[in-house]
Image (cartoon, rainbow, N blue to C red):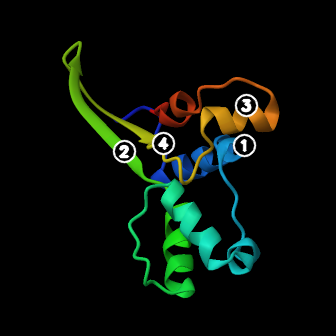
Amino acid sequence: MVEGRKQPVTVVRENFLRSHSSYTRKMSEEELFEMSRDELMQQLFKVNAVFSDTDDKGVLKAKLKKISHTRHLKIWHDFSTVANHGHLIFMIACFYDPALFYTNDEYERKTKRKVDIQTIIGSPEV
């Protein structure tokens, strides 16, 4: 007999997206389109992205878009035995990335609340 809470990864991803939305930088297509080449380079430099001074505006825009719209998830699993019954446990968490999420200082300036964003983002879902 199989029992337990079973959720597809897509549901977990959607939950993360909803719960992390207030800590996420939101960069629309229009904002990207309106940025100058220097602004794009500043944003890429700010998040430690690799780019070349010879890259044109389109290449810089594509790199910034990819970085600012990509979340990375980590999955940990454990096969344990409890009272002679096998249990397979998966935990999924999101990696904190300053290109995608606010830093603690930025969030405090924005909301006047002191929050440890990296801890919130890295909290796993079982």
Tell me whether the residue at label 3 lies in contact with that at label 2, contact meaning CB atoms closer than 8 angstroms. no
Number of the front mark, 4 or 3? 3
Q: Quarter-wise, where is residue 105 in the image?
A: top right
Q: Of label 1 and label 2, which has the lower sequence position?
A: 1
Q: Of label 4 and label 3, which has the lower sequence position?
A: 4
On the image, the x and y values in percent for residue 26 come to 70, 58
Tell me whether the residue at label 1 lies in contact with that at label 4, contact meaning CB atoms closer than 8 angstroms. no
Q: How many neighbours does mark 3 have within 10 angstroms: few (below 14), some (14-19), or many (20 or more)?
A: some
Q: How many neighbours does mark 2 have within 10 angstroms: few (below 14), some (14-19), or many (20 or more)?
A: few
Residue 22 - label: 1
Q: Name the residue nearer the viewer: 39 or 70.
A: 39
Q: Secondary structure at mark 3?
A: helix
Residue that carries the numbered disc 3 in the rendered image: 108
Tell me the kind of residue under disc 3.
Glu
Q: Of label 3 and label 1, which has the lower sequence position?
A: 1
Tell me the kind of residue under disc 2.
Lys
Tell me whether the residue at label 1 lies in contact with that at label 2, contact meaning CB atoms closer than 8 angstroms. no
Q: Distance from label 4 to label 3 (Cα)?
A: 17 Å
> What count of labels does the image hold?
4
Q: Of label 1 and label 4, which has the lower sequence position?
A: 1
Q: How many neighbours does mark 4 have within 10 angstroms: few (below 14), some (14-19), or many (20 or more)?
A: some
Q: Name the residue nearer the viewer: 54 or 102.
A: 54
On the image, the x and y values in percent for residue 77 come to 28, 36
Residue that carries the numbered disc 4 in the rendered image: 96
Q: Distance from label 3 to label 1 (Cα)?
A: 12 Å
Tell me whether the residue at label 4 lies in contact with that at label 3, contact meaning CB atoms closer than 8 angstroms. no
Tell me the kind of residue under disc 4.
Tyr
Q: Distance from label 1 to label 4 (Cα)?
A: 14 Å
Residue that carries the numbered disc 2 in the rendered image: 74
Q: Residue at the location (40% across, 32% down)?
A: 3
